[in-house]
Amino acid sequence: MFEFTEEDLKFNQRGRLSQSQREWLKSVARSTRSFSWTGAVVIVAFASLGLCIMLAVALQNEDSRAALSDSRYLIIFPVIGLVVLGVIILSMALAYWNANRLENAVLLSVVGNTRFDVSYSSKSNIRSYYVFVGEKRFTFADDMSRAIKEGAKYKFYYCKPGMYEFVMSFEKLES
């Protein structure tokens, strides 16, 4: 969750993101782009390793070496290369698309009474905390019961650019 200040809240009340919130969203976008490049390097490394292992095994005996000169096998390697390249291009395009949406995020808001819920996955050993504002559900990694009073009326300011959803600030309203 973005740690917001009174200044951030004042900007959000006017329907705008503050400069620090915009910078934070841009840093998340930069991380998304950087991670896509890291993923591309990992994909290329594993594909190259797999290719080297396949060639090493194929060159172990004379029959395998003869099979490699067959035109069907000569087509397989470029096709595999094109598939890997396509996966890399698609994953990077999606990452850049999501990053652009983060940088151009629109501030949304919801008003309603709050309630809490918790879920736990024994397989991943992860506990998720939910705050419902009216019918809208927000997911948190930490228990928000210290910052938010259950049953009280709140206004949450948030951004939902694509698959991401970030609570930018919130305020308790008088009932």
Image: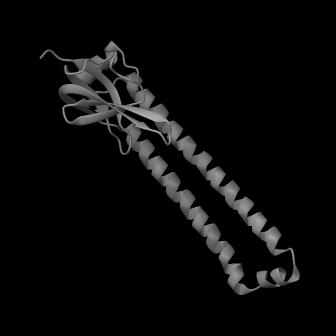
Residue 167 at x, y = what percent?
Answer: 33, 29
Q: How many marks?
A: 0
The residue at the far front in this view is 122
Residue shown at the point (71%, 80%) measured from the top left? 74
Q: Quadrant of the N terminus?
A: top left
126 w.r.t. 48: above or below: above
Direction from residue 18 to residue 47 in the image, left or right? right
Residue shown at the point (37%, 19%) measured from the top left? 4
Direction from residue 34 to residue 53 in the image, left or right? right
Q: Is residue 15 visible?
A: no
User: For residue 8, what is the image quadrant?
Assistant: top left
User: For residue 84, what is the image quadrant?
Assistant: bottom right
Residue 169 at x, y = what percent?
Answer: 31, 23
Residue 122 at x, y = what percent?
Answer: 47, 39
Q: Is residue 92 visible?
A: yes
59 w.r.t. 130: above or below: below
Q: Quadrant of the C terminus?
A: top left
